[in-house]
């Protein structure tokens, strides 16, 4: 005894596999034919071995089971083992930015920054390291989530804006701590603040979770912009 599924499809790269029936033992039977058209959003489908994409989502699966299209961000995170090279590449850029920032700041944080006149609400120097480490990690995860949607509209442009803001982020460390130019750094961080907002807007169209992961970064940069603006006139 078996009954037919109503024309649901599963995407596997460029292949489209139609699900045809469910035997009484609960296992899925399907007839596969290969086409060169990518399937769109599928509410339900059958995923054969070797396929990790279903519509716009990616998630772990059990062979021969019905799987539901899930939130792409959640599916991307649970599917990290299938995308380890991409995951590590996504973490690499913010890690490099962090390393460059550390090299630019390590000396000035010890012998220059403590001598500056700062507002009373300036955080202790020890706060900055853990905060930025966390923010760089969130950046990498957000970029990874968006990268798993490669090929969809807006992904290339969103990741381009993301890289621009990361370059501005790195430049700020060099300007403020490396060259010890708070005024130049203020111009840079205002541009960075705008670029982060643009990145969040671009990510939102692709994955809301990826966009939300950048909100703490945006808020911290807002605070850092105000702090930079407060320090500059006091030390001109």
Image (cartoon, helix red, strand yellow):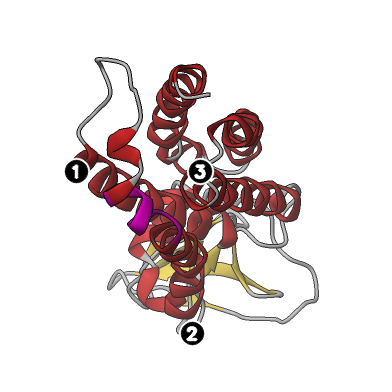
Q: Secondary structure at mark 3?
A: loop
Cα–Cα span, label 2 and label 1: 47 Å
Residue at the far right in the pictured view: 36
Q: Nearer the viewer, mark 2 or mark 1?
A: 1
Residue 107 on the magenta segment: yes
Q: Are the residues flagged by discs 3 and 2 in contact, CB closer than 8 Å?
A: no
10 Å crowding of disc 3: few (<14), some (14-19), many (20+): some
Q: Identify the mark nearer the N-term, 2 or 1.
A: 2
Whether residue 68 is visible: no
Residue shown at the point (37%, 78%) measured from the top left: 63
Q: Name the residue nearer the viewer: 11 or 112.
A: 112
User: Which residue is the site of mark 3?
Assistant: 180
> Disc 3 vs disc 2: which is toward the camera?
3
In the image, is 101 to the left or to the right of 191? Answer: left
Residue 39 in the image: x percent, y percent?
69, 61
**Residue at the location (51% across, 78% down)?**
51
Q: Is residue 66 magenta?
A: no
- Residue at mark 3 to residue at mark 2: CA–CA distance: 53 Å
Q: Which residue is mark 1?
A: 126
Q: What is the secondary structure assignment of the residue under circle 2?
A: loop
Percent of width and height locating residue 150: 66, 62
Left or right position of 13 against 231: right
Res. 175 in view: yes
Residues drawn in magenta: 104-110
Residue identifier under label 2: 50
Label whose residue precedes the other's in the sequence (3 or 1): 1
């Amino acid at each position: 005894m078996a009954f037919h599924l109503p024309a649901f499809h599963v995407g596997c790269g460029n292949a489209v596999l139609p699900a045809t029936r469910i035997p009484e033992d609960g296992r899925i039977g399907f007839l596969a034919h290969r086409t060169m058209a990518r399937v769109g959003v599928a509410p339900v489908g059958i995923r054969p071995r070797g396929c990790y994409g279903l519509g716009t989502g990616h998630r772990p699966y059990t062979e021969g089971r019905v799987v539901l299209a899930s939130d792409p961000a959640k599916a991307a995170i649970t599917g990290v083992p299938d995308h380890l090279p991409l995951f590590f590449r996504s973490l690499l850029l913010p890690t490099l930015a962090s390393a460059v920032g550390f090299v630019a700041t390590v000396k000035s944080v010890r012998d220059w920054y403590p001598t500056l006149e700062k507002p009373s609400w300036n955080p202790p120097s020890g706060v900055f390291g853990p905060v930025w480490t966390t923010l760089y990690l969130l950046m990498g995860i957000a970029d990874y989530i968006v990268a798993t949607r490669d090929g969809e509209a807006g992904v290339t442009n969103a990741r381009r804006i993301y890289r621009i803001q990361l370059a501005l982020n790195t430049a700020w460390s060099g300007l403020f701590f490396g060259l010890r130019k708070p005024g130049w750094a203020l111009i840079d961080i205002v541009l960075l603040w705008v670029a982060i907002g643009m990145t969040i807007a671009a990510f939102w169209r692709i994955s809301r979770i990826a966009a939300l992961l950048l909100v703490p970064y945006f808020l911290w940069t807002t605070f850092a912009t105000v702090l930079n603006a407060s320090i500059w006139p006091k030390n001109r």
